[in-house]
Amino acid sequence: MFQSRLRRVALAGLLVTALVVVLEGISFVGLAVRDGGLPSPHRWRAQRERVAQESGGPTAGTDAAARGIEAGGMQVIHPYLGFVLNPSFKVDWRDIDAQGFMRRPGEVDPPAGTPRFVFGLFGGSVAGGLCMRGRDDLLAELRRSPRVQGKAIVVRCLAMGGYKQPQQLMALAYVLSLGYQFDLVVDVDGANEAALAIHDNLNQGVYPFYPRGWSAMVAGAPSVEALRTVGRIAAAKEERLRWSSLCASRPLAWSPSCHLLWTALDRRLARRIYAAESALARLEPPAQSFAARGPAFGDLPRQQVCRQLADEWARSSTLMSALARDRGTPFLHFLQPNQYLRGSKPMGRQERLVAIDPAQPYKGPLEDCYPAFVEAGKQLAAHGVAFHDLTGLFADHREPLYDDTCCHYNDKGYRLVAQAIGRAAVEALAHSPERHADW
């Protein structure tokens, strides 16, 4: 009797194990097809980190308290740059330097006297992703330059999620005034200048060239309905942050099934956040004070708005180029790829589920305005700015490269962007004089 029961228990255990193996195998294949590469705990960790960053950051269009713009919050108002990160806000996967910009945990400058190559990277969250997820590929390309060999590469990550021109220009001018020196300056941007200027600023009656959500930083008390919506956004972000740790611990950290379940849940929560933010933008009346709304912009046709946004972006790039050139530093500007530029990438059904959302509030501004940025980029190049249009970089890649419905890439997408930037940098360094030590 005992042996018979033992055999039944053993058989049941084998069946359960077999079912788990089959389920994990199916999930592994599903993730490979969806993400366009072999699933790995490293990739899953990077996805969890990105979600934690997004969920711990500010909510566009909310009041100052909800945005975390107070002591101890993640973002704080900056007198020249709009906002930076609070160095006292600790996250285990990245540090914040004394000026409020991201750096890798434990990253320190090489000892005094060590030959170094200082690389400054500017832009929004895509540039910030290059600082963290694309850095190794970018630096591997840079090390092919004779100007870099034998030197320690120091990365100054002056990119910030939500930055748009002229914040990059202001950031470069600010750190140069503090005595920062660079051997190479790179700006990667474009999407925020279109999407945030319209959705986060103009739709709330705020001057498009002010920082995103500026009225919320300086406005008075919001309405009761706005507070309710802010609460829904904060609760959804908190829930998204909490669920991001679902598969963080072993053995679930190695489980394709857990990760497949988590990503499905995370995308549902992300859509809920996007919807609530859009509702808040429609709900809040335009701020009335000049401090909150800035100069009047007027109710212009979308095509004309797009041209003005692209012109401001191009002027800011020209000024960054001039600042760098006056310091003897090569400057390169890259227009980032974006999925909402028509014809820029072939997409299968699986990637479209990940990358395209008809309800995404940035979709319309990007579709309308990105062609104007492509045209403005051609003028930049014609006038001597080292400009590179990366919007066609993914044109020959059918595999999934986007990681969300906004603008960010998966590991392979970041690798392709980083390699393209690195190759262009090596070429630029080969044709520019070395920076004088006194500059």
Image (spheres, helix red, strand yellow):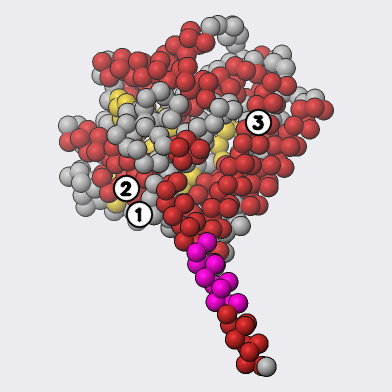
- Identify the residue shown where x is 62% and y is 32%: 274
Question: How far across and how far down the image is residue 388, in percent?
Answer: 30, 27
Q: Using the image, tell me which numbered label, if any, was put on residue 275.
A: 3
- Identify the residue shown where x is 76% and y is 27%: 226
Q: Using the image, tell me which numbered label, if any, was put on residue 110.
A: 1
For label 2, the crowd category at 10 Å Cα-Cα, with few meaning under 14, some 14 to 19 and many 20 or more, is: some
Residue nearest the viewer, comparing 27 with 207 = 27
- Identify the residue shown where x is 54% and y is 58%: 257
Left of 115 or right of it: where is 221?
right
Name the image quarter holding the N terminus: bottom right
Name the image quarter holding the C terminus: top left
- Give the overall secondary structure of the magenta segment: helix
Question: How far across and how far down the image is residue 107, in percent?
Answer: 43, 54
Give the SS element for disc 3: helix
Residue nearest the viewer, comparing 268 with 175 = 268
Q: Earlier in the sequence, mark 1 or mark 2?
A: 1
Q: Amino acid at mark 2?
A: Asp
Q: Which residues are magenta?
A: 12-23
Tell me: residue 361, above or below residue 352: above
**Is residue 171 located in the magenta-colored stretch of the structure?**
no
Question: How far across and how far down the image is residue 115, in percent?
Answer: 26, 50
Give the SS element for disc 2: helix
Quarter of the image for residue 29 reads bottom left
**Does the residue at mark 3 contact the one at mark 1 (Cβ under 8 Å)?**
no
Quarter of the image for residue 212 reads top right
